[in-house]
Amino acid sequence: MKNLLFLLTILSVSLVNAQAFIGKNDNKFQVGANFQDNASGINVSYDYGIGENISIGLSSTYLLGVDDALKDNDNDDLNAGFDSRFDIRARFNANLGNVINVSDNFDLYPGLSLGLKNFGGHLGARYFFTDGFGIYTELNVPFAKYKSDKLTAAETLHNQFTINLGASFNL
């Protein structure tokens, strides 16, 4: 029983010291899964704090699995090569964790992104269990697609609502 109490005390102290966003010079690296209609893949992102509530960074997604239903369409227009599967975005976040003041371990960050496929926005949240490790989720939506006429099946990849889930690390 003493060992269990000691372990819980150590764990709670480490949780108190965890911070989701510390402001200027904060470094976050995230890796996780990307889910969207007809495909799934890997997402990695890096955010750097440039102010008390502002960060900038890069996010990239590579789609590993593309739904066979898209490959079997009549026009065979799914060219799921590297250029269709890959996207990279510059991003801007407004880190609101200290504004909403839920916990030092929690950060909510809406933001904008400019990528190879579109201009869009995201709403993300991260929670840190220790100083170095946490989890995150992001909801992404395109605001303006670079091609305004009808998109082919391959062009719909990265040009739709997506969800990212994964691990977040303090660097």
Image: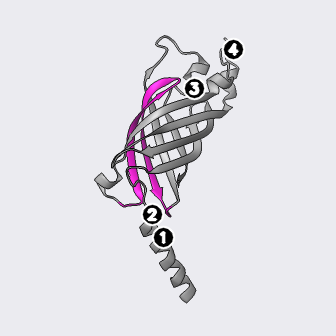
- Residue 38 drawn at (x, y percent): 61, 30
Q: Which residue is mark 3?
A: 157
Q: Are marks 2 and 4 in contact (CB under 8 Å)?
A: no
Q: Quadrant of residue 82?
A: top right
Q: Is residue 125 left or right of residue 68?
A: left
Q: Which residue is mark 4?
A: 76
Q: Are marks 3 and 2 in contact (CB under 8 Å)?
A: no
Magenta-tinted stretch: 103-131
Q: Residue at image x 50%, y 73%?
A: 11
User: Mark 3 or 4 closer to N-term?
Assistant: 4
User: Mark 1 or 3 closer to N-term?
Assistant: 1
Please tell me whether mark 4 sits on a helix, a strand or a loop: loop
Identify residue type, mark 3: Leu
- Residue 122's place in the image compared with 119, above or below, is below
- Residue 2 drawn at (x, y percent): 54, 89
User: Mark 2 or 4 closer to N-term?
Assistant: 2
Q: Quadrant of the N terminus?
A: bottom right
Q: Which residue is mark 1?
A: 14
Identify residue type, mark 4: Asp
Q: Is residue 130 magenta?
A: yes
User: Mark 3 or 2 closer to N-term?
Assistant: 2
Q: Is residue 152 left or right of residue 125?
A: right
Q: Residues within 10 Å of mark 4 (few under 14, many from 20)?
A: few
Is residue 1 visible to us here? no
Q: What is the spatial separation of the Cα atoms under label 2 and label 4, in whole angstroms?
A: 50 Å
Identify residue type, mark 2: Ala
Residue 18, numbered circle: 2
